[in-house]
Image: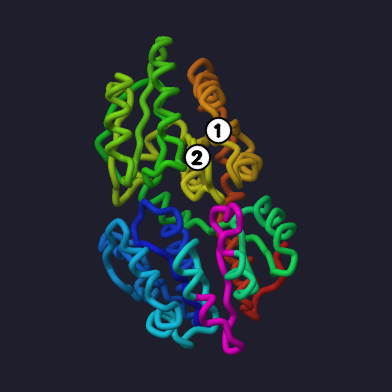
Amino acid sequence: MKICLIFNHLQLQDGVCRSAIAIANRLAGYKDIELTLIPLFRADKECYKYIDKRVAVKTVFGFYFRGFASIVLKIPSSLLYKYIVGDKYDVNIAFQYGLSIRIIAEGVNDNHNSIAWMHCYDEGLVYKDYYKKIGKVVCVSQCNAQRLKKELPDVDVDYNYNPIDDESIRLQGQQTVEIPRLNDVKFISVARMSPEKGYDTLLKCVQRLKTEGYKFSLWLVGDGPILNNLKRYAEELQITDYVTFLGQQSNPHAYVSKAGVYICSSTIEGYSTSCTEAIIQGIPVLTTNCSGGQEIISEAGCGRIFGMDEDSIYNAMKEVLENPDLINEWKEILKTTRKNFSPEIRIKRFLNIVGYKEQIDVQ
């Protein structure tokens, strides 16, 4: 069986990319499966050392600048499909919202299966016509799948939690790094610096807690369009002694493993890859009630879920700061519950979804 996963960028700061790599690495040992990763834009060389050598990577443009996607959209989707995919694969998976879905929808025919993978929910169903044409959509959380089934009853909807390459994550987490700042409690978050991650609200919470005399550190890992704005905002709030912007890191897991608590302040998520990667390393999670958040906390058996507003995030952080023993209690719980996030069941479900005949049913 030949499978392709098409997504935007091959870069480790993107959860979609890390999920694609995890799937590819897990399937690399299957003699009758050939999986090809197709990043449309950026292809960072650093990523290749984390990809099994048996996995094929087909880069398309190999670069990106702001507005480039809009230029590419002017190219007829039929030409993009012919050039990028063709009819070379048994299963074509549009693994990210946007251009990949347009491309895969253009090539739907009886010679292969086509699937759209929905990481974050498509609010307003902007791509509704494409989902209908593709015919099958997989959400990365049960709550989003249930919602989509109601909104698009004529489309085959399923769910699959993104597999996590747990062995690789734990190995990368052992790497020694320079600790940017030491305090009693160390919060960390890893994401692309973009508005939906809610970091402006998170920084405001840090200011409130600093004003009240709490001692802690916040590490923010990642790059993105609003990084400089966030740095300026931290200066305006006078919290640069509490917040460290680490930028894009080739190995964010090395920093996560040294933290006390992972915090997700997002307003939009599908099923947070970064949260599950933290749990795999035994780091408890605080998360907003974005899609998949409740499922993550339930499976972990510890941590906290809260609203997306400033007061809710502030109160969650304050609870940890006032009860630092909670962190150790949660870490003890994760020694048992993190097995719930192991990739084996998720990969079996993935194989069933793509129609791999040798797999048994997965509940």
The residue where tag 2 is placed is 266
Q: Residue at x 56, y 25 (%)?
A: 312
Helix, strand or loop: magenta stretch: loop
Q: Is residue 121 magenta?
A: yes
Which amino acid, by three-letter code, is at mark 2?
Ser
The segment highlighted magenta reads: 104-127
Q: In the displayed structure, does residue 319 sit left or right of residue 169?
A: right
Residue 138 percent coordinates (x, y): 61, 64
Q: Which residue is mark 1?
A: 308
For residue 363, the mark is none
Q: Nearer the viewer, residue 135 or 3?
A: 135
| Residue at the image position 46 percent from the left and 80 percent from the top | 34
> Residue 42 placed where, x, y %?
30, 63
Identify the image quadrant of residue 238.
Answer: top left
Residue sticking out furthest to the front: 74
Q: Nearer the viewer, residue 361 or 188?
A: 188
**Mark 1 vs 2: CB contact within 8 A:** yes
**How many badges with numbers are in the image?**
2
Q: Position of residue 206 (x, y in %)?
A: 41, 22
Image: 265 above or below 19: above
Alpha-carbon neighbours of circle 1 within 10 Å: few (<14), some, or many (≥20)? many
Helix, strand or loop for disc 2: loop
- On whether residue 122 falls in the magenta region, the answer is yes
